[in-house]
């Protein structure tokens, strides 16, 4: 095993990196049926379960489009406003329904499917004194519950989410504490107190945020992207180092709308958000891998 492991903090994304589907999405699809049944019992029969499900799932993207970057990940707030605003329910009725949603989120946390090799690789990294910090834009409870349900929590040293950062009176976030902005990564690095930081994620936001924040290495794990047909399997070897145009091409193939986070001063010549450390100037190496086992192989040898 490489002697780098014991001084390394692994900043690990959750949805798409540890497991395939966010349990809140699974819960919302079930919750739509409860909402429609509630409405029908009150004589409002013109609501379709599939339509309500689509509306609920779309709430996050609607908030992001309005640049409500923190609210977009606060599902309690999003759903409460939908119930009391668009569906005209009373505050008390909305709160009762939200309690049902919480129950479904907990239940669906036991149904998440882990990416291949996650458990074994995290165990190996921990056994060799690596620190595991889960870094997610999702609020704490939506990350903690599936970590607990899957048993991965025993490998995790810390969980960093926007609501955790906002509650810390000793940390001033100069921008939104979400990926791809630097403040979330800097906060995790301060808490981790390691000599070396490695990001493991599946999105452009993971890669760009880590590059801008001084990470030594970024693993872009594309197992889910291949499964979802967002990335051609033929462009992915077991482990492939990405630089320059190749890196930009892969990030764009992931079909992530990073323009949501753009401001005039945060866009480089390629249209990618890099206000502090440009992709072309970063000293970090980006390695695209198919599976978690490829990550372990790279870390064991210290090269890839």
Image (spheres, grey):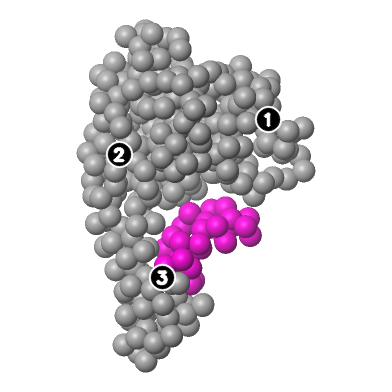
Kindly check if marks 1 and 2 are in contact, taking CB atoms under 8 A apart as contact.
no
Which of these two is toward me, 165 or 208? 208
Residue shown at 31%/87% (left/top)? 41
Q: Tag 3's secondary structure? A: helix
Alpha-carbon distance for marks 2 and 3? 27 Å
Q: Mark 2 points at which residue?
A: 114
Q: Residue at x 36, y 64 (%)?
A: 29
> Label 1's element?
loop
Q: Say whether disc 3 or disc 1 marks the residue closer to the N-terminus.
A: 3
Q: Position of residue 90 (x, y in %)?
A: 42, 82
Asked where in the image residue 4 lies, by quadrant, the reply is: top left
Rounded to the nearest whole Å, what is the CA distance between mark 1 and mark 2? Answer: 34 Å
Which residue corresponds to the image point at 23% horizontal and 46% vertical from the top-left?
149
Which residue has dot 3 on it?
50
Which residue bears the numbered disc 1? 276
Which-is-in-front pick, marks 1 and 2? 2
Q: Is residue 94 above or below residue 180?
A: below
Q: Earlier in the sequence, mark 1 or mark 2?
A: 2
**Left or right of 128, for residue 286:** right
Labels 3 & 1 near each other (Cβ < 8 A) = no
Q: For the stretch drawn in magenta, what is the main secondary structure?
A: helix
Which percent across, then down, holds residue 38? Answer: 33, 81
Magenta part of the chain: 53-82
């Amino acid at each position: 095993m490489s002697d780098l492991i014991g001084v390394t903090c692994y900043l690990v994304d959750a949805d798409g990196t540890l497991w395939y589907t966010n349990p809140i999405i699974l819960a919302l699809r079930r919750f739509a049926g409860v909402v429609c049944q509630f409405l029908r019992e009150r004589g409002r029969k013109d609501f379709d379960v599939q339509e309500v499900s689509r509306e609920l799932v779309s709430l996050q993207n609607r908030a992001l489009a309005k640049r409500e970057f923190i609210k977009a990940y606060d599902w309690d707030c999003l759903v409460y406003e939908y119930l009391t605003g668009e569906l005209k329910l009373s505050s008390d009725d909305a709160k009762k329904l939200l309690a049902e949603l919480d129950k479904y989120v907990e239940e669906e946390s036991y149904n998440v499917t882990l990416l291949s090799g996650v458990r074994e690789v995290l165990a190996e990294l921990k056994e060799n004194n690596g620190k595991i910090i889960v870094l997610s834009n999702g609020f704490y409870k939506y990350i903690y519950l599936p970590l607990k349900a899957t048993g991965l929590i025993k490998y995790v040293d810390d969980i960093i989410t926007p609501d955790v950062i906002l509650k810390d009176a000793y940390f001033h976030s100069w921008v939104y504490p979400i990926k791809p902005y630097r403040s979330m990564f800097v906060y995790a690095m301060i808490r981790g107190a390691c000599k070396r930081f490695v990001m493991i994620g599946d999105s452009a936001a993971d890669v760009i945020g880590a590059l801008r924040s001084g990470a030594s290495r970024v693993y872009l794990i594309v197992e889910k992207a291949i499964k979802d047909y967002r990335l051609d399997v033929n462009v992915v070897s077991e482990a492939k180092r990405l630089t320059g145009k190749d890196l930009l091409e892969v990030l764009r193939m992931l079909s992530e709308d990073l323009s949501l986070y753009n401001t005039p001063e945060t866009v480089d010549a390629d249209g990618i958000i890099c206000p502090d450390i440009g992709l072309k100037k970063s000293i970090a190496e980006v390695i695209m891998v198919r599976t978690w086992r490829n990550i372990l192989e790279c870390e064991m040898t210290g090269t890839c």
